[in-house]
């Protein structure tokens, strides 16, 4: 494919993308293919000779499209959204054009510096404390800063490693040698609630630490008192607390943990305090939601996915640390083929030392496009409209009379179920198993109908 054909085919692809989005709500959101369908209709070896763009395009429509679940559909109500936008797509196209491997400043100075700039933009937009900014008001380098990770799961791993590094330094400050401190790693324990995203447990599995899953309260929140009790029990058993994750907007119900209480305990125990706001963090662009996030200003790290609710194509997970020292110390490895920048290094952050992989895409470009083409006002309007729609749905469900709301509708998530009275037979009490089955059947019925895609969950045994 030469440049001329690329121009022609590129225009065709843009037209196909635009057509897809214009007609998306008319397509059933959930794929109905059976496992293994694709293996039966495509060759089991790569082609020996080149194939035409027309043939590939035809296969995309007839073989790939049937196996796609349409996350951008207005009828997709399953997992938290993975919003895209035309500005995000355009930014991604330019990123693909440059196709850099941006592991340090020299690789592409603009990629490093734009990431520092837009992460400070975004941090200010969601109201983060100044200690999270990469560049201070006077133009000098801050101790903290933001970095774009691929996912919140990657962010979890990175900050848990930083928390472990901080705990090791604390042990060495108490008189242990480096080897002696390292031998204590098997005693390190991280704290999550029973509503924390699975990313927390996966991160713990990867770095090899113990975990303590703490039961949430009636509002499905991790509380200060529960965390204190868990830490006291573990310390009595000879374990070493080093990390806690509070959540701003849990996966099941969008609940908000006791972030001020968690911060108080973390400070007292000198453990790393991470706030996972993967979904709901985007709501903080609207000032009216910021009081709900009291306590994040005291956290060691804060993360939300711009690719969930902020119109930026996957992958774009925004992570900030208040002090990058432990993160960089834990992940920094120097080799002679990583040439340093010369001169003023205020804007020179080696982001390879802020993440697990060495190479990294130019993700900041699509975020820059989104923030500029929507503006803060456009992003706020997007968030507020989704919240309005969620409130409307809650009102409709309650007005119907057959449903009950199981968690407060604060953001864009509505958690509901059939009332027990709807399936009750006479005066007999409804068995929990029957109630759960009825709600699962309702979800299955809606999905089979094909007009929308819903998902059920389990809240302490209740569907």
Image: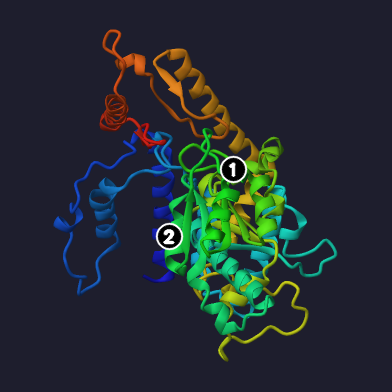
Q: Position of residue 21 (x, y in %)?
A: 43, 42
Along the horizontal axis of the image, is 303 left or right of 14?
A: right
Answer yes or no: is residue 108 visible: no
Farthest residue to the top: give it: 426
Mark 2 or 1, closer to the camera: 1
Observer-nearest residue: 362 or 26?
Answer: 362
Q: Crowding near pointer 1: few (<14 within 10 Å), some, many (20+)?
A: many
Indicate whether 133 appears above or below 214. below
Please name the residue shown 43% across and 38% down the image: 22
Q: Where residue 202 is drawn, which disc sits there?
A: 2
Farthest residue to the right: give it: 138
Q: Where residue 370 is drawn, which disc sits there?
A: none
Q: Do the residues under discs 2 and 1 have CB atoms within 8 angstroms?
A: no
Helix, strand or loop status at disc 1? loop
Q: Crowding near pointer 2: few (<14 within 10 Å), some, many (20+)?
A: some
Observer-nearest residue: 152 or 123?
Answer: 152
Farthest residue to the left: give it: 40
Answer yes or no: is residue 261 visible: yes
Q: Position of residue 324 (x, y in %)?
A: 67, 69
Q: How is the image coloured?
A: rainbow
Observer-nearest residue: 434 or 35?
Answer: 434
Q: Earlier in the sequence, mark 2 or mark 1?
A: 2
Please name the residue shown 24% across and 59% down the image: 55
Indicate whether 433 appears above or below 421. below
Q: Position of residue 405 (x, y in %)?
A: 47, 24
Indicate whether 342 appears above or below 463. below
- Rendered-image quadrant of the C terminus: top left
Farthest residue to the bottom: give it: 336
Q: Position of residue 121 (x, y in %)?
A: 70, 55
Q: Label 2 to label 1, Cα distance in Å?
A: 22 Å
Please name the residue shown 61% across and 54% down the image: 369
Residue at image mark 1: 223
């Amino acid at each position: 494919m030469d440049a001329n054909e690329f121009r022609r085919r590129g225009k065709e692809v843009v037209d196909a993308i635009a057509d897809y989005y214009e007609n998306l709500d008319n397509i059933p959101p959930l794929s109905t293919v059976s496992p293994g369908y694709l293996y039966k209709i495509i060759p089991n070896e790569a082609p020996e000779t080149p194939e035409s763009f027309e043939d590939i395009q035809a296969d995309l429509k007839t073989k790939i499209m049937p196996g796609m679940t349409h996350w951008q559909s207005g009828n997709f109500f399953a997992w938290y959204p993975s919003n895209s936008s035309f500005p995000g797509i355009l930014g991604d196209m330019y990123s693909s054009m440059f196709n850099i491997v941006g592991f340090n400043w020299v690789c592409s100075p603009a990629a490093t510096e734009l990431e520092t700039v837009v992460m400070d933009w975004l941090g200010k937009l969601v109201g983060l404390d100044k200690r999270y900014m990469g560049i201070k008001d006077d133009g000098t380098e801050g101790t903290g800063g933001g970095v774009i990770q691929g996912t919140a799961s990657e962010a979890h791993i990175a900050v848990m490693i930083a928390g472990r590094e901080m705990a090791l330094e604390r042990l060495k400050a108490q008189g242990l040698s480096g080897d002696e401190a390292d031998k204590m790693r098997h005693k390190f324990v991280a704290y999550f609630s029973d509503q924390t995203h699975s990313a927390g447990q996966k991160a713990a599995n990867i770095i090899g630490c113990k975990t303590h899953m703490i039961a949430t309260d009636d509002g499905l929140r991790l509380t200060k008192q529960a965390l204190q009790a868990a830490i006291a029990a573990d310390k009595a058993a000879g374990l070493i607390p080093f990390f806690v994750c509070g959540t701003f907007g849990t996966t099941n119900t969008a609940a908000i943990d006791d972030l001020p209480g968690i911060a108080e305990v973390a400070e007292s125990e000198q453990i790393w305090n991470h706030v996972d706001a993967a979904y709901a963090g985007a709501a903080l662009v609207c000032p009216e939601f910021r009081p709900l996030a009291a306590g994040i200003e005291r956290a060691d790290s804060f993360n939300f996915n711009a690719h969930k609710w902020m119109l930026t194509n996957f992958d774009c997970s925004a992570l900030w640390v208040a002090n990058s020292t432990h993160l960089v110390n834990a992940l920094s490895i120097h080799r002679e083929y990583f040439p340093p920048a010369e001169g003023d290094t205020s804007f020179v952050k080696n982001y390879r030392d802020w993440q697990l992989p060495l190479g990294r895409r130019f993700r900041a470009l699509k975020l820059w496009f989104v923030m500029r083409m929507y503006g803060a006002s456009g992003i706020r309007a997007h968030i507020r409209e989704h919240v309005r729609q969620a409130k409307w749905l809650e009102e409709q469900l309650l007005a119907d009379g057959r449903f009950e709301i199981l968690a407060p509708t604060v953001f864009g998530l509505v958690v509901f179920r059939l009332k027990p009275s709807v399936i009750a037979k006479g005066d007999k009490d409804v068995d929990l198993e029957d109630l759960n089955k009825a709600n699962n059947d309702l979800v299955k019925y809606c999905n089979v109908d094909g007009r929308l895609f819903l998902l059920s969950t389990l809240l302490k045994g209740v569907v």
